[in-house]
Amino acid sequence: DAGVIQSPRHEVTEMGQEVTLRCKPISGHNSLFWYRQTMMRGLELLIYFNNNVPIDDSGMPEDRFSAKMPNASFSTLKIQPSEPRDSAVYFCASSLEGRTGRRRNEQFFGPGTRLTVL
Amino acid sequence: TQLLEQSPQFLSIQEGENLTVYCNSSSVFSSLQWYRQEPGEGPVLLVTVVTGGEVKKLKRLTFQFGDARKDSSLHITAAQPGDTGLYLCAGVRWGNSGYALNFGKGTSLLVTP
């Protein structure tokens, strides 16, 4: 089975440009998470969807960031305009969230997109 | 907000040595997870501990959840170069809107032959 798929794997862009990161979760999973990882701040949750609905976006840094999940098999994270401080590795993760065994939920991470904003 | 503190931040040891890494918090979690991340890849779940005082073993790795469910430790016996990676702990919190993982910054482990 394919795991979580992210594209592109690497993105280099100039300050002010729009960046769109893409994620395909594992088929059948009902929860999707976007994270950002930097050396300084570690792994931070940006936004969390359940059944395609945004549940918690309190981690989204500012209005320049937006995320969508138009269907169960696709999500995007958009940065517009991008800034050098947005440089990081962005991970998408998915899980099957259920009330049975709720304390054992496992998140499956994609390989990440390494974003560099010059 | 970083709720979980991991120590040490970096650890370099030789093959065959034992080591322990720690994950501490002032908050209580429903459960706690340990992940390992290799360069260029996403984190992969190693174990979930649920009950205070719980101990789980995964081959040479021993995980313990504190009695108060605020802290955890990971002990590796006879480390091997294949154990090299970033070890992340994540506290699981459940709320009305679902659950969230709060990650520590990780312990970067290097095991040299």
Image (cartoon, coloured by chain):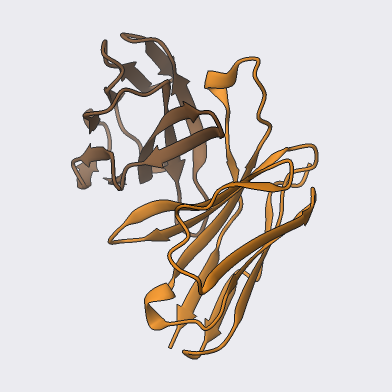
Chain colours: A orange, B brown
The residue at the point 32 percent across, 42 percent down is: B104
Q: Against A55, is A113 above or below?
A: below
The residue at the point 58 percent across, 20 percent down is: A102
The residue at the point 27 percent across, 16 percent down is: B66
**Residue B11 position in % (x across, y down):** 21, 45
Q: In which quarter of the image is the N terminus of chain A?
A: top right
Question: Residue A100 versus residue A54: which sits nearer the camera?
Answer: A54
Q: In which quarter of the image is the C terminus of chain A?
A: bottom left
Q: Against A5, is B56 above or below?
A: above
Q: Can residue B42 be seen in this view?
A: yes
Question: Residue B87 versus residue A81: which sits nearer the camera?
Answer: A81
Q: Residue furthest left?
A: B8
**Residue B110 position in % (x across, y down):** 29, 48
Q: Is residue B17 visible?
A: no
Q: Against B81, is A101 above or below?
A: above
Q: How many labels does the image show?
A: 0
Question: Residue B21 versus residue A37: which sits nearer the camera?
Answer: A37
**Residue A37 position in % (x across, y down):** 42, 58
**Residue B87 position in % (x across, y down):** 36, 40
Asked whether, in this view, residue A108 is left or right of residue A116, the answer is right
Asked whether, in this view, residue B56 is left or right of residue B79, the answer is right
The residue at the point 50 percent across, 71 percent down is: A63
